[in-house]
Image (cartoon, rainbow, N blue to C red):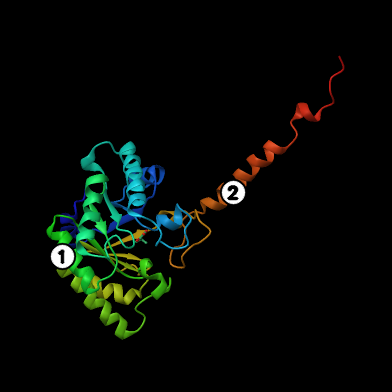
Amino acid sequence: MLRPGDWLSRKQEGAPLALLTAWDALSGAWVAEAGVDAVLVGDSLAMVALGHATTLPVSLDEMLHHCRAVGRGVASVITDPVAQPLLILDLPFLSYQCSSDEAVAAAGRVLKESPAAAVKLEGAEPETLAVIDRLVRSGIPVMGHLGLTPQSVHQLGFRRQATDPVAQDRLVHQAEALQSAGCFALVLEHVPAELAQRLQQLLAIPVIGIGAGTACDGQVLVTADLLGLTSRQPPFAQPLVNLRQQALPALRQWVAAQRAPTSSAASPAPHC
Ligand code: KIV
């Protein structure tokens, strides 16, 4: 397992990191078998697995439930815990914003009640930086997340972020502050590629891009987007395969076969 403390040297070695999301045992087994460095149990599961329109409704209990399933899926294909990818869990909306005591309690539950060994949280407001500092000093590894931060969808939308120089400078300061607060890596979502490259060069911690160009220290994608599983595809994630398009005809064929008259039903009743 690539422990959070090893991520800095991974960046220094120039070895790119590959992360994918998972939300249940099946997706966890698939991404682990594919050889990812880390599995993100992202709160995107609120949309992908639970059918919500945003990530906001998912609770900490639900996140823990899904994370345990992902952990079982990973363990089913990689039995040696040392060889398993790092599991990172998204702290859901309002589990860390109300007070740093509640944030420590929430992140503590993640480490005690699930196989995740790190948490991710969004933003870099002063209160969030104070929370990160406290979590890190409590022994809880934290991944930061800037750019398109879906928990702020009602302020930012699902649009590309930091498109003008003022917003870019602000994001650079926030990224530096996250590094100073002790984050072991930073997810940068849906921002211009030049900004991601600037941060990749500036920061010592790995910059993990999603819709942020290729000049990052690693990439993360929502696995459902990569596999073309959903009908809602973000503009920056081109599916490698379209499993939805392949699955639907098979499912329709099965349904039609159940409704079709069987050959015995279709043939006339035998005379006795
Ligand atoms: O929730 C999630 O899946 C994420 C990724 C988009 C990085 O945060």
Residue farthest to the top? Answer: 272
In the image, is residue 144 above or below residue 42? below
Q: Nearer the viewer, residue 219 or 152?
A: 152
**For numbered disc 2, what is the local secondary structure?**
helix
- Give me the residue at 47% from left, 62% from top: 53
Query: What residue sits right under mark 2 in the picture?
Result: 248
The local crowd at label 2, few if under 14, some if 14 to 19, many if 20 or more residues have their Cα within 10 Å, is few
User: Can residue 32 be seen from the camera position used here?
Assistant: yes
Nearest the camera: 234 or 134? 134
Q: Quadrant of ligand 1?
A: bottom left
The residue that appears at 43% across and 67% down in the rendered structure is 236
* Rendering coords of residue 84 (x, y %): 26, 43
Which residue shows up at 82% across the image and 27% down it?
A: 267
The residue nearer to you, when weighing 69 against 37, is: 69
Question: Is residue 183 in view?
Answer: no
Q: Which residue is tagged 1?
A: 133
Q: Position of residue 245 (x, y in %)?
A: 57, 52
Foreground of the two, 167 or 154: 154
Lateral position of residue 88 relative to residue 229, left or right? left
Query: Residue 189 vs residue 178: left or right?
Result: right
Seen in the picture, residue 216 relative to 240 is either above or below; the reply is below
Q: Quadrant of residue 272?
A: top right
Q: Are marks 1 and 2 in contact (CB under 8 Å)?
A: no
Numbered disc 1: secondary structure: helix
- Residue 246 vertical placement versus 199 (above, below): above
